[in-house]
Image (tube, grey):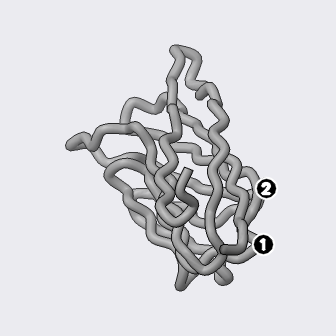
Amino acid sequence: MNPNFIRISLLLLTTDLCFGNIIDVRVYGTHGKNATFTTTIKPTSDPFFSVAWAVNGSFIITSTISNTIVEPKYADRTTLFRETGSMELRNLTNEDSGEYTVHIIPASGHLISGAAVLEVQHE
């Protein structure tokens, strides 16, 4: 795997119980480079009610229809793509290594969740 080009497909599944199954994906990133956490969700005409990304249980970015909150240490390094729930993290540091989770609530109200483990390495 080329650590300079990172695309993470989070295999996101839904159930009828409003609970998302989590599928883990391991990815390697390079210090100072970017990582894009790409979901498999296709854009729809109805906006998601909410999208929340966290690393090791601490929120990075939370976005609802009316508001987006970004943890200050990620403010200049994160872009959320609300149409798909994907997120880009720029200028990776060793502290960015960890388990990333995403929780998306679409207009249907059924929770969709995904997870990936990012390991940041030096070139």
Q: Residue at x 59, y 28 (%)?
A: 20
Q: Amino acid at mark 1?
A: Glu
Q: Badge 2, how many Cα within 10 Å: few under 14, some, many 20+?
A: few
The extreme top residue here reads: 16
Residue 74 appears in which quarter of the rendering? bottom right
Q: Observer-nearest residue: 71 or 11? A: 11
Q: Position of residue 106 (x, y in %)?
A: 41, 39
Mark 2 residue type: Asn
Residue pictured at 72% horizontal, 67% vertical: 121
Mark 1 or mark 2, which is nearer the start of the sequence? Answer: 2
The residue under label 1 is 95
Q: Position of residue 68 (x, y in %)?
A: 48, 69
Q: Residue at x 43, y 50 (%)?
A: 85
Q: Which residue is mark 2?
A: 56
Q: Mark 2 and mark 1: span between their CA atoms?
A: 11 Å
Side of 103 relative to 26 (left or right): left
x and y percentages locating residue 101 in the rendered image? 65, 48
